[in-house]
Image (spheres, rainbow, N blue to C red):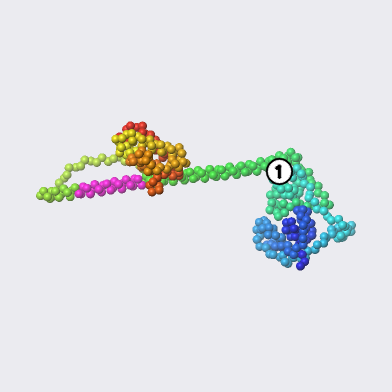
Amino acid sequence: MAGLSLKCGDCGALLKSVEEAQEHAELTSHSNFSESTEAVLNLVCTTCGKPCRSKTETDLHTKRTGHTDFVDKTLETANPISLEVPKPSVVSDEGVVATGSTSESEEMVVPEVDKNLLGELEVMGFPTTRATRALHFSGNASLEAAITWIVEHENDSDIDQMPLVSVNIKVEAPKPSLTPEEMKIKAQELRERARKKKEEEEKRMEREKEKERIRAGKELLEAKRIEEENERKRIIALRKAEKDEEKRAREKIRQKLEEDKAERRRKLGLPPEDPTVVKPAAAPVVQEKKSSLPIKPVTKVERMRDCLRSLKQNHKDDDAKVKRAFQTLLTYVGNVAKNPDEEKFRKIRLSNQSFQDRVGSLRGGIDFLEVCGFEKIEGGEFLFLPRDKVDMAVLNSAGAELNSAIVNPFFGIL
């Protein structure tokens, strides 16, 4: 089967003709070409009719235009390739185009561009091919014009291909309108503008983050306020229920006393008490003035204080033992507060004889540690304070209560 294309052995590109192979060799310096029976793709856009020679070209065309439908006409346009190099056409004095009238082929070279502008673009990070192409097609006018051209043509498929012009066509690069010093200043201005834009974006993002932190903080405070309000209402409702229950209990006791009184009169043979007899008026009940202050739930500090009072009252005959227990508890709490990450200070074996002699055997000692956050684990063999439950405020309060119990001689007596 006749060859349908030329294949580059260096990069695998398929080329339609010898001319394309020569141009590919000039652009890439590849020189290994062979005849191939594989036809060059011809994917035609059904919307605008643009032919694309690879999947990459169709993707770029879709990105630029939004066209997505292509028809594969590769087989329709596939023709055997000619390996003969066509002779250049020249125009005679009579205006007739003659082919092969000269043996010289037209040579394509890289166009001359402003070296200073090219150096500035390379310093700014643009590839040499892209910078050369931008300066050539923007007329070497200025650094800003070249950058503008790159931005407008950054999606072109040949953006990183070196431009070529005929050697017979002399293109004189126009003199730059700016001196080298002015071009450096302009480049510096562009960099400064990009830097300021980046700083403004970072400041904007920081402001957004700060707004989000403030919003989250307000929501947290509002949730805490609602939780405290609900807790206050719950305590009030609980105390009201307790008062109602106490009132019903007193009423039952009063009825029982009345029944017992009537039963005793009956046994003594006395007539039933006449309900019409006016009883002496009871002393007026002084209505307590309700406090407008909110009722606070029992805090951990109050529970700590109750544990220490209970410990001292249950062992009031042995002040030395009580004081030693307080000092031991203060040591446990202080070690955890100073070294919260050390597990050995947050774990206590309940069967330890020293612990039992000093704290464990005294009523209220273990309760105090549990109020501080310690929990019984492993079937009650250990007291353990998890790291995520270490509350420095609670530990500081515990230390203050223990210190007060140690130095105050009237603690637990009044």
Residue 268 rendering spot, x and y as whole percentages: 11, 48
Q: Secondary structure at mark 1?
A: helix
Closer-to-camera residue (373/223): 373
Closer-to-camera residue (291/377): 377
Residue 149 rendering spot, x and y as whole percentages: 71, 49
* 362 sits to left or right of 126: left
Tell me the residue at 77%/66% (across/down).
2
Q: Which residue is mark 1?
A: 123
Q: Quadrant of the N terminus?
A: bottom right
Specify the segment rendered in magenta.
234-256
Quadrant hosting residue 93: bottom right
Residue at the outermost left position? 269
Tell me the residue at 67%/58% (across/down).
59
Tell me the residue at 28%/48% (across/down).
245
Q: Quadrant of the C terminus?
A: top left
Q: Is residue 300 above or below residue 133?
A: above
- Tell me if residue 254 is in the magenta stretch: yes
User: Magenta region's main secondary structure?
Assistant: helix
* 195 sits to left or right of 412: right
Quadrant hosting residue 51: bottom right
Q: Is residue 101 above or below residue 391?
A: below
Decide: few, some or many residues near mark 1? Use Cα within 10 Å; few <14, some 14-19, many ≥20: few
Whether residue 181 is visible, yes or no, is yes
- Tell me if residue 135 is in the magenta stretch: no
Give amino acid for label 1. Val
Count of numbered marks:
1
Whether residue 293 is visible, yes or no, is no
Tell me the residue at 26%/47% (across/down).
247
Residue at the outermost front position? 353
Residue 314 rendering spot, x and y as whole percentages: 30, 39
Q: Is residue 79 above or below residue 351?
A: below
Quadrant hosting residue 338: top left
